[in-house]
Amino acid sequence: MKALLTNLQKVCFDASNQTVKAFMSNDVSSTENLQITHAKVDELSEEVERAAKNQSFSELSRILAVANLLRRVYDLSVNLGELVG
């Protein structure tokens, strides 16, 4: 479970860092990977949800909350990416 959440965190925060850099440099081409990354975020989110079902209810709630917050980081990165250029 830790590995799945760590991978999701890395993908989401990499997208965030890339988008901020693109915004600061007004580099539209740097935001094009966000759509490709979207599929990876979906895939990892689904894997986390499947794996979390084997946890206790309290652990399930915590895991899904963390995954949802990481997903929001990614979604906000996409929103920021739309402002580039």
Image (cartoon, rainbow, N blue to C red):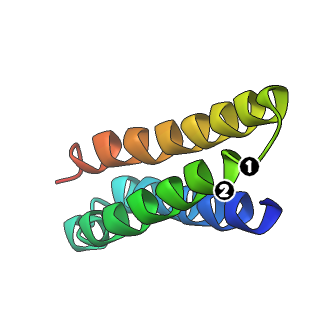
Q: Which amino acid does label 2 sit on?
A: Ala
Classify 56 as above or below 12.
above
Disc 2 versus disc 1: nearer the observer: 1
User: Whole-percent x and y of residue 33?
Assistant: 30, 72
Report whether 31 appears left or right of 65: left
Horizontal arrangement in the rendering, residue 49 relative to residue 40 (left or right)? right
Residue 74 seen anywhere in this rendered image of the structure: yes
Q: Position of residue 58 (x, y in %)?
A: 83, 26
Label 1 element class: loop
Quadrant for the C terminus in the image: bottom left
Which residue sits at x=25%, y=64%?
35
In the image, taking residue 32 as reference, residue 55 lies left or right, namely right
User: Which residue position is annotated with label 2?
Assistant: 51
- Mark sitting on residue 54: 1
Q: Is residue 42 above or below residue 72?
A: below
Which mark, by number, is residue 42? Answer: none
Relative to 52, is 68 on the left or the right? left
**To which quarter of the image does residue 64 belong?**
top right
Instruction: Tell me the quadrant of the picture where the N terminus can be found.
Output: bottom right
Mark 2 to mark 1 CA distance (whole Å): 6 Å
Q: Can residue 16 be seen in this view?
A: no
Tag 2 near tag 1, CB within 8 Å: yes
> What residue is at 44 percent from the left and 60 percent from the top?
41
Indicate the amino acid at tag 1.
Answer: Asn
Residues 39 and 60: in front is: 60
Residue at position x 41%, y 69% in the image:
40
In the image, what residue occupies the spot 66% across and 31% down?
A: 65
